[in-house]
Image (cartoon, rainbow, N blue to C red):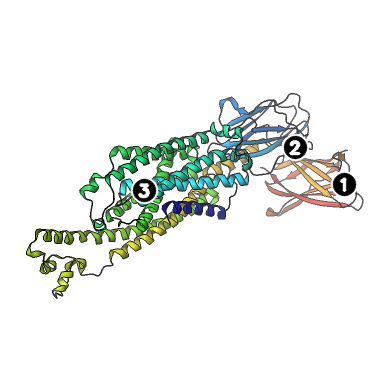
Amino acid sequence: MSAPRRAVALVALLGALFLLGGAGPVSAHSAVRETTPGEGTVLKSAPKQVTMTFTESVGITDDSLRVLSPENRRVNAGDTEHASGRSDAVRVPLDDGLADGTYTVAWRVVSADSHPISGAFTFSIGKPSETTASVSAEPAVNPASGALYDIARYAAYAAVALLIGAATFVLVCRPASAEPLRGLVRAGWWVLVATTAALLLFRGPYERGTGPSTLLDPELIENTLTSRPGWALLARLALLAGAAVFLVRLGRGAEQQGTGSPEGESLEKESPEEDQARPKPVVLAVGGVLAVGLAGTWAAAEHASAGIQVPLAMTSSVLHLLAMAVWLGGLAALLTTLHRSEALLPATSVARFSRLAFASVAVLVLTGVYQSWRGLGSWDAVFDTSYGRILVAKVCAVVLLLAAAGFSRRWTGRLTDAEEPLRVPVLETVGARAGGGADSGPGAGSSSGDTGESTSAAADDGSDEKPENESEPTSPPGARRGALRRSVLAEVVVGVVVLVITTVLTGTQPGRAEIETAAAEETAAAGQRTASTTLIPFDVGTPGGHGKVQIVLEPGRVGENTVEAVIIGPDGGIATVPEIRLSFTLASQKIGPIDAGLTNKGGYWGTSSLNLPIPGTWTMKVTVRTSDIDQVSETRRVKILR
């Protein structure tokens, strides 16, 4: 299989792993800290605007906030904008003279690390009412658009690893022939160009929650090109254009110098010709700048760009991505060279990569520890959050990868030790024969040979003496190379798994943010909530014996609560029934049922003396009796705050 085909196969494997793993919705990376009016608030007069504050800065569009009347009519008086220049607060003005009733606010924003989030809440003016406003319960990301976007992200990670890793392997490790790696570098470049262009197109539907059919919508494309993720993708394309020029010139230079060597010379240590072929510092500098720039386009649009210590986090993210690319992409290059190169890979090249991989692992460990601390924030987040559990899986995979790397390093050392002495007797014999001296005869072979391969002449003269270095049997270099190929292949396979887990990790809300979000939501709910409204359908099975019962529990917290229960008939109007009974049970604490003791208030049933002793998720049971013999009971869960 050619190098480009292997690269395509690797990308296909990543996509398959993604699909098998499931393309669930991306976890929210920001959360609502506060809303004005608050969730479930009943206001005496109409507000002038709706304001929302998030746990981190968010991106918005003109219709990020939509306020709907009870009749499902938009009452926005203008476009959504950031409040008072704050990047974490948004607001929208409302029409004047809003009527009484329950209003629904549907919102959709993009968090600082480029992931879209959405939701809805309600508030009431005067008195809660039935509302016909329908807010889609679909996830923030359209499943089809999200799957295509994530597949492109996975492929982009694989491509940048191939591109940077293979190019670094050629420049630093200097294999005997770079020809087998040209296809690998080209494949990495083309796949990265294609996936970057695809991400530019998929970004719009991904943010707006629309399907792939809106891929070429001019408005969505314009929004993408003017957003921070869009700028990062455009910068990536520009850097790839520069990388193309750099690689072409580098390839021409390699052709002029000629990197190939005869098979017999592949066992030599670095020769003067190889020393001259060492890349110039300016070449390494240009390549390094391009690699850092490419890695920076990820850091500018992912977790590192939001949260605490952003400059340090972005630097760490760039180093982490570069180390990953050099290690995993270098492994792919090493495996390709071991299998496809016509000239034997010099042991010195393998040793150089071994040192390069060790340095990459050191960088990965240091930056990984910092990013883990930054993403988790506490030990509780390790197993209590999705980010922490995925991070544990990544650590386990990296441990396996390090074990495979240990085997490769051991075989590298054996290969280097085995090939180094092969150089001396061959050169001495050739030199002796060139001089035409008598020592070049069979007797000279027995006196000058130090290894089994150079003692054939000694065998001819019948000598049974064993050379000093053959006191222990050793496997031939071919067997060592085969073992090295297998250990490197194992590294590549586990490396692909690590790459997949890493990509999943970048799409998961950090544990620190998840815990802070939960705390903010709980605080906001405790401070804002003044009522809980539940709408429960019922049907007693008789003509006209169906409808809905709306139960308003105020304030929905521990202690005294007021309850109002209203029956909404089949025609949507207020209806009356002979009786409504309501009770509350907290099974986990073996409390209840507590009878609310509702009484007929003339048009609705209610009480002002319901006492709920402790917070928790209670089971609310409502029984509606429509005649002397017809009744039905329904249950719902309701959260009672402290």
Q: Give the side of residue 320 with respect to residue 37, left or right.
A: left
Q: CA distance from mark 1 to mark 2?
A: 29 Å
* Front residue of this view, candidates 622 and 18: 18
Which residue position is annotated with label 3?
A: 360
Type of amino acid at the residue the image marks with label 2: Ala
Q: CA distance from mark 1 to mark 3?
A: 74 Å
Q: Which residue is mark 2?
A: 133
Q: Is residue 213 left or right of residue 321?
A: right
Is residue 513 visible in the rendered structure shown here?
Answer: yes
Q: Name the residue at 68% across, 54% down.
A: 588
Q: Amino acid at mark 3?
A: Ser
Q: Residue 579: which disc?
A: 1
Q: Residue at x 32, y 40 (%)?
A: 284
Q: Tell me where residue 459 sits by quadrant.
A: bottom left
Report helix, strand or loop for mark 1. Answer: strand
Q: Nearer the viewer, mark 1 or mark 2?
A: 2
Indicate which label's residue lies in the foreground, 1 or 3: 3
Badge 3 element: helix
Residue 156, percent across and down?
A: 48, 45
